[in-house]
Image (tube, rainbow, N blue to C red):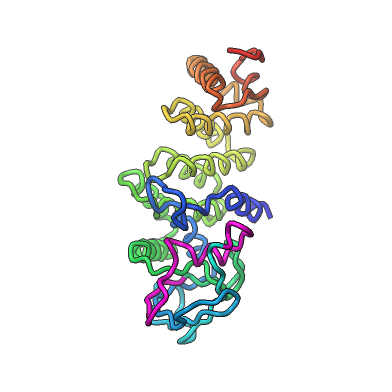
């Protein structure tokens, strides 16, 4: 239930906008990788085919001929009927299927127009069984999907190689792969090894493959699981959050303080885990962000950093 609510919160906050091209994302592709990742870790099929319906009508099925399986067992019929929803409906009433038809600008309808489809066979990412998670004619996105499917199959065959995939996004910028890894790690697919999961997520915080808006999602995940971690893993999380607060990007720094506030509220031990010299730097950065209006003064942070609760710093 917590995962479902978290997913809903992400979309209500507008994080689906990069998927449909309404918001630029740097580096590009993280939101796509995250979205496709929902399919790659669930019971889904991804295929390349041809749109047989030339002019879609909202509420009526769109027929797609299946030509090539990209991911999943080749057990689909030769023709698949997909529920169609006008992507513009998103602005009035969220529907996961509407997002599916808007990814990357959506498919190009016409005479045997090509399309890449991610089809859910179980409830996933806001769509039901037999509904599309993604339908696009965008060749760049299709190339990304093929690459992600290839990486997902490698991880399926050898889960222990997930650390190698994280190393890949540390060494070179790859937004789509980073998005997929975020989904994979937060779906708890590593035999419930929370220490390993949080270690890998923490490493992702330092990767240029992760856009600023996603830093907050990683911080939230680390904070949620903090209570279940070993003492060593807890110390690593506190260090990650402390390092974020020192970033030049105010938004990223604010995410670091949000993480510290989240865990300090329930765990006063946090203040014993930060060296005095670091605490001085944190207090200085905190005051500066409060003055700028980038961070709201917070009782947990005031207590942690030894800051007096006054109207002005």
Q: Would you say residue 154 is visible in this rendering?
A: no
Residue 212: horizontal and vertical position, in percent? 45, 40
Residue 7 as seen in the image, left or right of residue 46: right
Residue 159 as seen in the image, left or right of residue 43: left
Q: How many marks?
A: 0
Q: Is residue 151 above or below residue 297?
A: below
Residue 139: horizontal and vertical position, in percent? 33, 66
Q: Give residue 206's quadrant in the image.
A: top left
Residue 247: horizontal and vertical position, in percent? 43, 28
| Along the viewing direction, whichever of 155 and 301 lies nearer the viewer | 301
Q: Does the magenta-highlighted stretch encompass residue 90?
A: yes
> From this viewpoint, which residue is outermost toward the bottom?
78
Q: Is residue 102 above or below residue 274?
A: below
Q: Does the magenta-highlighted stretch encompass residue 132?
A: no
Residue drawn at x 44%, y 66% as measured from the top left = 106
Q: Would you say residue 84 is visible in this rendering?
A: yes
Q: Give residue 60's quadrant in the image.
A: bottom right
Quadrant containing the C terminus in the rendered view: top right
Residue drawn at x 46%, y 73% as measured from the top left = 72
Residue drawn at x 48%, y 67% as measured from the top left = 134
Q: Is residue 25 above or below residue 242?
A: below
Quadrant containing the N terminus in the rendered view: bottom right
> From this viewpoint, which residue is outermost toward the left?
172
Magenta stretch?
Answer: 89-117
Q: Is residue 203 above or below residue 126?
A: above
Residue 131 as seen in the image, left or right of residue 250: right
| Along the viewing direction, whichever of 210 and 265 lies nearer the viewer | 210
| Along the viewing direction, whichever of 36 and 51 lies nearer the viewer | 51
Residue 195: horizontal and vertical position, in percent? 53, 43
């Amino acid at each position: 239930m917590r995962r479902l609510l978290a997913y809903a919160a992400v979309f209500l906050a507008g994080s689906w906008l990069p998927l449909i091209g309404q918001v630029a994302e740097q580096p590009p592709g993280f939101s796509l990788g995250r979205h496709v990742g929902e399919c790659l870790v669930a019971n889904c099929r991804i295929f390349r085919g041809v749109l047989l319906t030339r002019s879609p009508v909202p509420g009526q099925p769109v027929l797609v001929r299946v030509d090539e399986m990209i991911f999943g067992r080749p057990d689909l019929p030769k023709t698949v009927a997909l529920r169609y929803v006008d992507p513009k409906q998103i602005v009035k009433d969220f529907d996961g299927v509407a997002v599916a038809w808007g990814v990357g600008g959506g498919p190009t309808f016409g005479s045997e127009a090509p399309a890449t489809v991610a089809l859910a066979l179980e409830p996933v990412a806001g769509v039901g069984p037999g509904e599309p998670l993604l339908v696009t004619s965008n060749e760049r996105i299709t190339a990304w999907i093929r690459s992600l499917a290839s990486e997902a199959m490698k991880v399926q065959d050898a889960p222990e190689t997930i650390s190698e995939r994280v190393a890949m996004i540390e060494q070179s910028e790859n937004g789509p792969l980073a998005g997929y890894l975020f989904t994979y790690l937060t779906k708890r697919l590593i035999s419930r090894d929370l220490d390993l999961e949080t270690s890998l997520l923490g490493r992702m915080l330092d990767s240029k493959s992760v856009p600023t808006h996603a830093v907050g999602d990683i911080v939230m995940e680390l904070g949620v699981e903090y209570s279940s971690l070993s003492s060593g893993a807890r110390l690593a999380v506190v260090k990650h959050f402390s390092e974020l607060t020192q970033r030049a990007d105010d938004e990223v720094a604010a995410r670091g303080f949000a993480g510290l506030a989240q865990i300090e509220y329930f765990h006063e031990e946090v203040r014993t885990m930060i060296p005095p010299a670091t605490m001085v730097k944190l207090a200085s950065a905190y005051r500066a962000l409060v003055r700028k209006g980038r961070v709201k003064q917070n009782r947990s942070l005031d207590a942690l950093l030894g800051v007096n609760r006054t109207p002005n710093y």
